[in-house]
Image (spheres, helix red, strand yellow):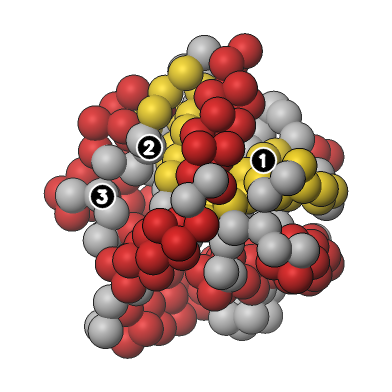
Amino acid sequence: MAAHHDGRVGRVRLQRPDKRNAVDTALAEEAALLMRRLAAAGIDVALLEAEPPTFCAGHDLSEMGAGTLETGAMRLIEELNDSDLFWIACVNGPVVGAGLGILATCPMVIATTDAWFSLPEADLGFFPGGMFAGLENIIPVRKLMDMAMTGRRVPAAEAMSWGLVDEVVDPADLMSTAEGIAASLASRPELVRLGRVAWRNHVRDATYRDRHQSLLGPALQAIAATVGRAEPA
């Protein structure tokens, strides 16, 4: 992980390229510390970046064998959701599984033309329950069901038409576009704070936790069983 800030705009970068930026507990804990430091420095807007070529591969499957709800990816999702910062996700490649849950915490998402999005759990024969609950207030439910049941890769332009992505740009323009938006927002801190609260309340309405827990538990148990079968005897 890496973090710094320039004026009122912070930047946090996922840096685990050898694991396609899959989130384990260590990465989540480091990210939480960096986010708190940015907030303590008076930062209102932050860019969430990732070491290419993958934005985030979701859960680190090595943590899934116990079937626990307390995975690194879920920890990072909760930390981002509870953060007082207004997050702009800068998506520079594939976003898979729990990586979509990370995007759901960000009020704005800018993606490159070569980015794509997938819930590949369907390819393993189980339903991506936790991510479904986190995304159903963002993506039209029939489009989300398409992702959940097919596991197909959704191109950035299509994801934008669904409302998952705000803007699609050429890879060379990603950071300049995000930085320009962030700088503009950071000049209006009260608006940013209210927007952050509005986003959190929309994505995580009064029924979210019940829906999330009822869908996530069976999904993680299925993942744990799959990981267990894949381990050598």
Per the rendering, the mark at residue 139 is 3
Secondary structure at badge 3 equals loop
Residue at x-position 51% and y-position 57%: 189
Do the CB atoms of the residues marked 3 and 2 lie less than 8 Å apart?
Answer: no
Label 1 crowd (10 A; few <14 / some 14-19 / many >=20): many
Q: How many labels were placed on the picture?
A: 3
Q: Is residue 210 visible?
A: yes
> What is the x, y in percent for residue 102?
53, 56
Secondary structure at badge 2 equals loop
Per the rendering, the mark at residue 165 is 2
Q: Nearer the viewer, mark 3 or mark 2?
A: 2
> Which is more N-terminal, label 1 or label 2?
1
Residue at x-position 52% and y-position 13%: 170
- Residue 90 occupies which quadrant of the picture? top right
Residue at x-position 60% and y-position 32%: 179
Residue at image mark 1: 49
Do the CB atoms of the residues marked 2 and 1 lie less than 8 Å apart?
Answer: no
> Which is more N-terminal, label 3 or label 1?
1
Q: Is residue 130 left or right of residue 40?
A: left
> Label 1, label 3: how many angstroms apart (C-alpha)?
22 Å
